[in-house]
Image: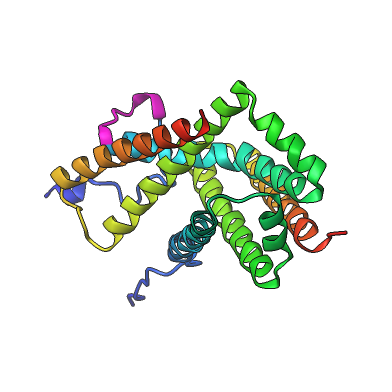
Amino acid sequence: MVTPRHAVGAHYGLRDWLVQRVTAVVMALYALLLAAIALVNGGIGYELWRALFAHGGFKIASFLTMVALLWHAWVGAREIFMDYVKPTGLRLMLQTTTIALLVAYLGWTIQILWGGK
Amino acid sequence: MPSLDRPAAKPRPVYLDLPRIRMPIPSVVSFLHRVTGALMLLFGIPLLLYAVSASLASRESWGALEAALAHPLAKLLLIAAAWAFLHHLCAGIRHLLLDVQVGVELAPARRSSVVVFVVSLALTLVVGMKLW
């Protein structure tokens, strides 16, 4: 009896491919927002910068962009490790370190955005 | 029947031997896409977070950051960072276009790689002139 063979997997490939593009668009939009704010105000000084980061909506947008950036970085790093780092142990170590670092960066981001005096 | 000569299962995963790969222009763009991405992950994210944190802490730390970034070496680093970001952005946009089947043929793909280089370097030049 022939069992039909399905080309299925963990779907990391498709998900990562999509994540990489969606997160890229999120970052591009945030960059455009910043550029527009700078353009309208003729540059960004300390007062405006502080006012921006005091605004709840801007905090959320910044947070979402950081999540997009860190997730994007993870997908890229994982791809590079898979291509060039052959020993499984070393790869596992690099991947674990990267995840720990990225999660720590997210903590730092939250501290900056909501830990203000 | 060439298919019969082929082994049933190819050894996977395939690892890339970088020094033995000949790189035409699209793959140089692709390679630099990875290099700039890795550099921004390693140095860009922590420096960015540090800078944003310092810029918001107080007027004094904003001023100190401004003074530090006015140093010629800091400006060179900023220009390098701008190039890395702009190359990564342009190569990324090229990728999105390729995804929707724009410029997938060999000749347009080569042309768009040149465009990525030209546009990202030109924009880096603009940033450099703004800084100096």
Q: Nearer the viewer, residue A60 or B34?
A: A60
Q: Residue at x 53, y 52 (%)?
A: A42
Q: Is residue B102 above or below residue B26?
A: below
Q: Is residue A51 above or below residue B48?
A: below
Q: Is residue A100 left or right of residue B69?
A: right
Q: Quadrant of residue B17?
A: top left
- In the rendered image, is residue A42 in sight? yes
Residue B86 screen position, x and y as percent? 43, 42
Residue B130 screen position, x and y as percent? 48, 35
Q: Residue at x 77, y 53 (%)?
A: A108
Q: How many marks?
A: 0
The magenta segment is B18-25
Q: Is residue A93 above or below residue B72?
A: below
Figure quadrant of the N terminus of chain A: bottom left
Q: Residue at x 35, y 47 (%)?
A: B10
Figure quadrant of the C terminus of chain A: bottom right
- In the rendered image, is residue B16 in sight? no
Q: Quadrant of residue A116?
A: bottom right
Q: How is the image coloured?
A: rainbow
Q: Residue at x 56, y 40 (%)?
A: B40
Q: Nearer the viewer, residue A29 or B104?
A: A29
Inspect the magenta stretch and tell me whether residue A78 lies in it: no
Q: Nearer the viewer, residue A9 or B69?
A: B69
Residue B84 screen position, x and y as percent? 48, 37
Residue B88 screen position, x and y as percent? 43, 44
